Amino acid sequence: MLPNRVREIRESLLMSKAELARKAGLSPLTIDRIERGAPCRLATIRKVLLALGLTAADRERVFPELS
């Protein structure tokens, strides 16, 4: 499990885990798992990126383990 930048970006936007989960249509538990580096599906990654106001092109910057 490699680190990703989801937590760092979420906190820089002053967004709670619950808020990110709601915007992404995911559970707060899923957000917690993603922030801890657990693997997830590409569809889930896409939801998180969009909820953070990013695009699919930002995927490797946020999830370096995908490169």
Image: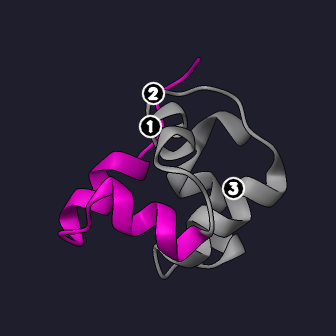
Amino acid found under the numbered disc labelled 1: Asp
- The segment highlighted magenta reads 1-24
Q: Position of residue 20 (x, y in %)?
A: 42, 65
Amino acid found under the numbered disc labelled 3: Ile
Question: Marks 2 and 3, how far apart in space?
Answer: 14 Å
- Residue at the disc numbered 2: 36
Q: Considering depth in this image, is 65 or 40 the residue closer to the camera?
A: 40
What residue is shown at x 34% (from left), y 47% (from top)? 7
Mark 2 crowd level (few <14, some 14–19, many ≥20, 10 Å Cα): some
Whether residue 67 can be seen here = no
Amino acid found under the numbered disc labelled 2: Arg
Q: Which mark is residue 45?
A: 3
Mark 1 crowd level (few <14, some 14–19, many ≥20, 10 Å Cα): some
Q: Are marks 1 and 2 in contact (CB under 8 Å)?
A: yes
- Residue at the disc numbered 1: 32
What residue is shown at x 45% (from left), y 27% (from top)? 36
For residue 46, which quarter of the picture?
A: bottom right
